[in-house]
Amino acid sequence: MKKAFPILGVLTAILLIWALYQALVGAPTEQTMGNVQRIFYYHVPSALVGFMLFFVNFGASVLYLIKRNPVADIVALVAAEVGVVFLTVNLVTGPIWARPVWGIWWTWDMRLTSTLVLWLIYVSYLFLRRFSSSGETPALAAALAVLGALCVPFVYFSIWFFRTQHPQPVMGGGGSIDPRMLHVLLLNWLAFSFFAFLVCWSRYRLETLQRAVDQAHALESLLDPSGSVR
Amino acid sequence: MSGNPYLFAAYAVTWLIHITYLGTILRRYRHLKREIEQLRRSGLKS
């Protein structure tokens, strides 16, 4: 497994560079918005990868609530953390696109507001994990994660249920897109999915190591300097 | 509407966020390595 990481890392870097080239040069220029539309190739995949990770977090949290499996708990934590990073990218690139297209940075429209609420739910999940040391923290966090995951479909389909300024979803929605643009979008989604997988892998290794060190510290504190149990 | 500065800003900020996060992982990993080294040394003493 350790050998696979650098190989996958190089492949992901090549894929990301190729996807960036396609987003900046390969994809046709949109007639109305011009080059600013190319933000979409980073904005949309970031949201999709974030949503995917929140579903992983949901699955792992449910598994943890049923079986109390510590591996599931680590997977849930890692997926939420990396998911928040991707949703942050989505929330930051959105206003950068909106300013030249809509003339405003932000509007309290249902899609934008629900995305912000979703982000806040997962940030509070991470705060709970970080600052609560109770033995019940993983279970409480898992329950919060289930609530967060229920919001994901609502955020994605909010465009259908409410009048909103946000464009229609490209996949599973009523929007249409040039096939070459769709190809570049899917390429970027694939590249960011691989990247997210590698980041999760690194973070998983870090978390397992951290827990092993914490256990060693706890064990050390139980022993007196002579090595016998206090 | 060209929007090149906005495009550049969006792509730059994306990578800035990812690189910052990767930096925190690396920093935590280095800190952990130092802790493991200390634990090893204290283990050898006892």
Image (cartoon, helix red, strand yellow):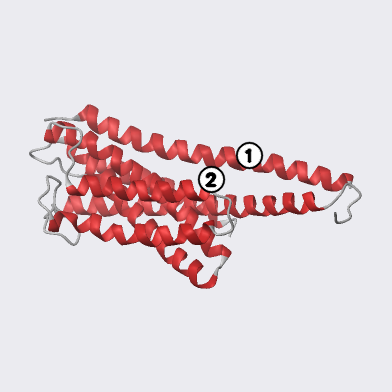
Q: Residue at x 21, y 29 (%)?
A: B4
Which circle, 1 or 2, is nearer the viewer? 2
The amino acid beneath tag 1 is Arg
Q: Which chain does the residue under circle 1 lie in?
A: B
How many marks the image carries: the answer is 2
- In the depicted view, which residue is nearer to us: A36 or A103? A103
**At which x and y percent is residue A210?**
63, 50
Q: Quadrant of the C terminus of chain A?
A: bottom right
Name the residue that disc number 1 marks.
B30
Secondary structure of the residue carrying tag 2 is: helix
**At which x and y percent is residue A6?**
54, 50
The amino acid beneath tag 2 is Phe
State yes or no: discs 1 and 2 in contact (Cβ < 8 Å). no
Left or right of residue A108: residue A137: right
Name the residue that disc number 2 marks.
A131
Q: Quadrant of the N terminus of chain A?
A: bottom right
